[in-house]
Image (spheres, grey):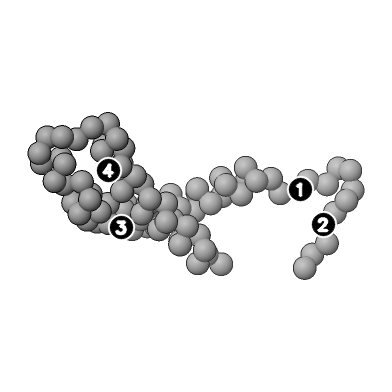
Amino acid sequence: MAAMSTQPGARQPSKARGIRAACAYCFRPEYLRRTIVIALVVGTVLTSVNQLDVIARGDATTATWAKCVANYLVPFIVSNLGLLSGRE
């Protein structure tokens, strides 16, 4: 493990820089295409299983639509976290 510099002028890696690097990696076209497909497939299945009857009846509320958005957002985030965890 490398020792951290304690010199006054030394730059430490910032959290923001790490987040930007992770986003840049996840938004590379070859990875983004894959994670979007995963989110669309999984989100559609989850929405169909959990909310389709409510939507079909016409009883969908704002909360129902928020759950539908989450059904797509969560698989997108999880697939990107998996992508980042496998990065060397």
Dot 2: within a 10 Å radius of its alpha carbon, few (fewer than 14), some, or many (20 or more) residues? Answer: few
Give coordinates of residue 79: x percent, y percent: 40, 58
Mark 3: amino acid: Ile
Q: Which residue is mark 2?
A: 4
- How far is disc 4 from disc 2 in space, using C-alphas? 45 Å
Which label sits on residue 64? none
Residue found farthest to the right: 7
- How far is disc 1 from disc 3 in space, using C-alphas? 36 Å
Instruction: Tell me which residue sits at (82%, 57%) in the image.
Output: 4
Find out whether the residues at labels 2 and 3 contact each other: C-beta distance under 8 Å. no
- How far is disc 1 from disc 2 in space, using C-alphas? 8 Å
Residues 61 and 29: in front is 61
Find out whether the residues at labels 1 and 2 contact each other: C-beta distance under 8 Å. yes
Tell me the SS state at disc 4.
helix
Q: Earlier in the sequence, mark 2 or mark 3?
A: 2
Which label sits on residue 38? 3
User: Of circles 1 and 3, which is in front?
Assistant: 3
Which label sits on residue 12? 1
- How far is disc 4 from disc 1 in space, using C-alphas? 40 Å
Tell me the SS state at disc 3.
helix
Q: Earlier in the sequence, mark 1 or mark 2?
A: 2
Tell me the SS state at disc 2.
loop
Instruction: Tell me which residue sits at (47%, 57%) in the image.
Output: 81
